[in-house]
Image (spheres, rainbow, N blue to C red):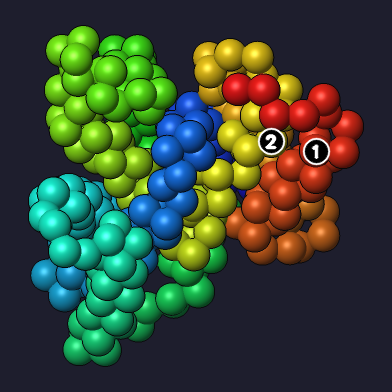
Amino acid sequence: MLGFILNALLAGLMVAAIAGPLGCFVVWRRMSYFGDTLAHSALFGIALGLLLEINLELAVIMACTVLAVVLVLMDNRRGLSTDTILGILAHSSLALGLVIISFTDNQVNLLSYLFGDLLTVSTLNLAWIGIATFIVMVLLFQNWNKLLAMTLHEELAQVEGINTKAMRLLLMLLIALIVAVSMKVVGILLITSLLIIPPACARTFARTPEAMALIASAVGCLAVCGGIASSWFWDTPTGPSIVVMASLLFVIGRLSGPGERA
């Protein structure tokens, strides 16, 4: 009994801890729609994994990574706005994933993928989440100043010698990796909430970007603990419960905080 609760708690805390600082860039750069697009492509990755009979986590990571690269390549071309490109990729990958699943013989519980099933996190799932979290944390820490400079003023960052195209691609790949491994925590349809709500709540109290990242991680971890607790005591779905807790923390923060700072 304690084993699966511990796995769920560790998985949720690891994802929330890294989604906080990474989500700050999503909020600062107004990339929430990009997160939704990656989340939709995760279902396409699941479909390919089932069709090719390969590890689902690996298939989702590959699908999200390819979509992130495709978006960067398409974004460099003139003619279509970023929102239009994101809309096309999001709905196309979601629809294609559902079509592919219909051709597989596997009996798939789509609800567990769409809304998460944190209490069924296995040791292997936990290992995937741990590896991805470590990789994202190291790369984010090493490139924090460059990513921050690009976010604050992209043209000035270019003048200072920062390769903004490479940094933009790196940021998208990091988001793609976290979206891919977060599937078990809150589900495909709710993944973006962990990248947006905790940073939005932290923005009320933070005086510096670094403080906002730390507070966002703390808010995310509190939401995970509260969501798992409510799921345990009231038998509510774990993923949506985490999002509800994060939303409550956001509302409380907005009502009691001094206003946006970072």
Q: Residue at x 51, y 39 (%)?
A: 27
**Among the 4 quarters of the image, the one containing residue 214:** top right
The answer to whether residue 178 is visible is: yes
Residue 164 horizontal/vertical position (percent): 20, 27
Left or right placement of residue 212 versus residue 14 in this view: right
Residue 206 horizontal/vertical position (percent): 66, 19
Left or right placement of residue 70 versus residue 64 in this view: left
Identify the mark nearer the N-term, 1 or 2: 2
Q: Which class describes the residues within 10 Å of circle 2: few (<14), some (14-19), or many (20+)?
A: many
Screen quadrant of the C terminus: top right
The answer to whether residue 224 is visible is: no
Residue underneath mark 1: 254
Which is more toward the observer, 136 or 198?
198
Residue 176 horizontal/vertical position (percent): 30, 46
Q: Residue at x 13, y 49 (%)?
A: 76
Residue underneath mark 2: 201
